[in-house]
Image: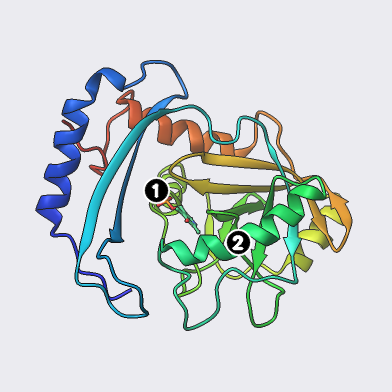
């Protein structure tokens, strides 16, 4: 976007100050948190397609409940795309989300909660789950697509991969064709499918439509995804040692 970068020290000091000011708003209940959302927008009063000279750096925070309180129902999107090779899909810039509204609304009208994006070139491989990174458990292995310039480098993806290693769960970073999910589930094999992101942490997928056929990933209590989620929550709440030094105390 050619926007100026916010120096890390200023960024962290601003978040600390805001959280201190708003500490009464930090929820104590389980599954509820204070969501912190920093962002930058251009603010100068000018009309035109040009790099702006003036910006506003803002942080908002608000108590937030579960993002998706129930397992989600999704469809594999093979018509519209979220991000193309060489584009800005790896960034959290507004345009990426603007372009996702229409296809997502269409899916909602068809009874789905979200869409699973496929790659722009072949439309065969899984990319992301709405605004979350996508992961699957196939044959007891945690599988997720490799990062690229079409996939956002989510911190939750990173943490879940690390936790899987800590728990001695095998991980595999490779592209996942939706055809593979279909054939695994058609053969009656257990497949877990879920989105990962800061807001929802892990969002289980209970139904997936692949070329208008419904399949039902595994979402029982003993699923590996819940083990991973609980471990991350324990680290966040300070119930187990934060061995990777992920927490930032204020
Ligand atoms: C925010 C976001 C994610 C998740 O990123 P986190 O850093 O884990 O919150 C994944 N994909 C997209 C497209 C996103 O916007």
Q: Quadrant of residue 20?
A: top left
Secondary structure at badge 1 equals helix
N-term mark: 1 or 2 = 2
- Which residue occupies 31% across, 59% down? 41
Q: Position of residue 17 (x, y in %)?
A: 14, 35
* Residue 127, horizontal then vertical, whole percent: 59, 66
Task: Name which residue lies at 23% across and 42% down.
Answer: 245
Label annotation for residue 159:
1
Which image quarter is the C terminus in?
A: top left
Say which of 39 and 216 sits in front.
Answer: 39
Q: Quadrant of the N terminus?
A: bottom left
Crowd class of label 1 (few under 14; some 14 to 19; many from 20; radius 10 Å): some
From this viewpoint, is residue 187 visible?
Answer: no
Q: What secondary structure is found at the residue carrying circle 2? A: helix
Q: Tag 2: Cα neighbours inside 10 Å, few (<14), some, or many (≥20)?
A: some
> What residue is drawn where x is 82% and y is 53%?
185
Residue on which the image places disc 2 = 100
Residue in the picture at 55% in, 78% down: 84
Does the closest atom of ligand 1 sit within 8 Å of the Cβ of label 1? yes
Residue 231's disc is none
Question: Foreground: 13 or 41?
Answer: 41
Mark 1 or mark 2: which is in front? 2
């Amino acid at each position: 976007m050619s926007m100026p970068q916010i120096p890390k020290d200023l960024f962290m000091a601003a978040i600390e100050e805001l959280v201190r000011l708003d500490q009464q708003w930090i929820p104590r209940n389980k599954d509820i948190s204070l969501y912190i959302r920093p962002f930058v927008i251009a603010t100068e009063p000018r009309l035109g397609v040009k790099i702006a000279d003036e910006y506003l750096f803002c942080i908002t925070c608000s108590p937030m409940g579960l993002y998706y309180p129930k397992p989600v129902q999704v469809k594999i999107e093979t018509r519209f795309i979220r991000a193309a090779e060489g584009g800005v899909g790896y960034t959290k810039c507004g345009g990426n989300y603007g372009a996702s509204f229409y296809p997502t609304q269409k899916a909602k009208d068809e009874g789905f909660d979200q869409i699973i994006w496929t790659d722009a070139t072949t439309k065969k491989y899984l990319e992301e789950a709405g605004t979350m990174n996508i992961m699957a458990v196939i044959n007891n292995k945690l599988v997720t697509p490799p990062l690229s310039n079409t996939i956002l480098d989510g911190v939750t993806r990173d943490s879940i991969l690390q936790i899987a290693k800590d728990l001695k769960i095998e991980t595999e970073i490779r592209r996942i064709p939706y055809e593979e999910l279909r054939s695994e589930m058609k053969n009656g094999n257990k497949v877990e499918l879920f989105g990962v992101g800061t807001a929802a942490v892990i969002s289980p997928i209970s139904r997936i439509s692949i070329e208008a056929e419904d399949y039902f990933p595994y979402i029982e209590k003993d699923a590996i995804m819940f083990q991973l989620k609980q471990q991350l929550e324990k680290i966040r709440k300070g119930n187990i040692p934060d061995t990777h030094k992920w927490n930032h105390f204020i």
